[in-house]
Image (cartoon, rainbow, N blue to C red):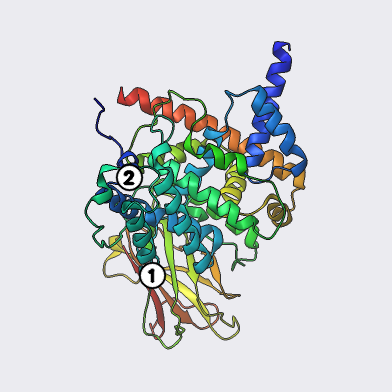
Amino acid sequence: MTRRERDQRRERLRELQADEVLGMLDASDVEELRALERALPDEDALELELAAAELAAAAVEPSQEVPSELLAKLRADAQAFVGGAASPRPGPASAGPALEPRRVTALAWAGWLVAAACLVVIATLARPTGPRTEREEFIEFVATAKDVVRLPWTATEDENIPAGGVRGEVVWSPSEQRGYMRFEGMPVNDPGARQYQLWIFDGGREGEAPVDGGVFDIGAAGEMLVPIDAKLLVNQAAAFAVTLEKPGGVVVSKQEHVLLLAQA
Amino acid sequence: MTSPPETLLERVALGDADAVALCLERYAPLVHAMARRWLGAVSDADDVVQDVFVQVWNSAGKYDPARASERGWIAMITRRKLIDRSRRGRSGPVTDNLEENAGFEVGVSDHGLRSVELRDEAGRVHEAMEDLDAELRGLLCAAVVEGETHTQISARTGLPLGTVKSRLRRGLLRLRESLGVAQAKSGEARA
């Protein structure tokens, strides 16, 4: 085999390995992949797979609290393993102490997490530009903005909050002066009757009215992504609030219906 | 004389109860979040998380810190389980070979991806992603993080299927390349 032929085979092998890691390897290509792997045993797919895995890990925000029922199952499995039931090889700790129940909490997850963007959505989005564009823009935003702040929503006891509650977060970049709101379970509104409006409380404008963050609609159930449209420069975003207002929004809210709050 | 285990997973492999508990505490939130992001359904996600940790316990002895960080290794197992779960009920490419290689028994790299702070790892991925253009980033996130198939991505974006496949492939290859460069820089900085 010439060097050129070998290089071509290596390149083809990498392509097929990438396809496999990405879950898009055609059945017809499997045999070719295996043959190339046998011919080029030094070219394993581990680094490709690790690259994908590291991206997947970096793009999510670890759960703040693992459900207690799941945690109990995990501990039971772990206990069985430590007790030797599932141990691949006996170890000195097989007779060691039982696993103490621990509350699984997120560790120092606070660091920057890449496309935490991908946090979001596959949903219908609220802007006329369409969900695909919004989603892609959001991914781009979180992947590139280096000072993204993420604040979870806290639902108030307003009568418009559904029984199941509303979850989500505000994602804001102080340097870029833009961001997104993510909602789960936010009630669909009739734009002709009432619209949602975002307010940004600026720590650099104490005593002044909050900055208008834009009027928006929720057009469908499920997870929704809405860009923030701040009307003024926000020096220090201290809190965000969503109110329900008349169509078109208001200049100063009477705060009759404050639905969600997110505080820095 | 054998040296004492150095990494958490080496201790797990020896059945160290404290290490097993610490492993759960450290990585269960990550695995759970990855599963929820990919599958959405709570019950399915919980099943996957359980499967992942059973495999972690049973495969910890195969973990090679010279080839992957613990976080990367556990994330890789998680992805495999998620892909397998997504494929149930429909025909598709197989992952048997990837599964067999879970323990890094083939080849040994000298990249020295030793334990690093989780934050550093995420930052390293961030840097690597910055080397890709926005479209590639979006496509990779859709496929790798959200679990969308290339067919779904094609339907959503309007890009021809072949284009989606070739761009995803190119994106992943470039990400790996960039991560390798970032890793080398990180190793130089620590040296």
Give the image quarter of residue B184: top left
A5 vs B188, nearest the viewer: A5
Determine the residue positioned at 33% across, 37% down: B116
A126 vs A236, nearest the viewer: A126
Instruction: State the mark number for residue B12.
Output: 2
Q: Position of residue A13 (x, y in %)?
A: 67, 29
A130 vs A106, nearest the viewer: A106
B39 vs B187, nearest the viewer: B39
Callout 2 secondary element: helix
Q: Position of residue B182 (x, y in %)?
A: 44, 30
From the image, state whether disc 2 or disc 1 is nearer to you: 2
The amino acid pointed to by label 1 is Glu
Q: Is residue A123 left or right of residue A255?
A: right
Q: Position of residue B40 (x, y in %)?
A: 54, 64
Instruction: State the mark number for residue A69.
Output: 1
Determine the residue positioned at 55% across, 48% down: B80
Q: Is residue A74 above or below residue A48?
A: below
Q: Position of residue A211 (x, y in %)?
A: 39, 67
Give the distance between the C-alpha atoms of the residues marked 2 and 1, in whole angstroms.
23 Å
Q: Is residue A246 above or below residue B191?
A: below
Discs 2 and 1 carry the same chain letter: no
Q: Is residue A56 left or right of residue B123?
A: right
Chain assignment, label 1: A
Instruction: State the mark number for residue B26.
Output: none
Determine the residue positioned at 50% across, 58% down: B48
Question: Pointers 2 and 1 in contact (CB under 8 A)?
Answer: no
- Which quadrant of the figure contains the C terminus of chain A? bottom left
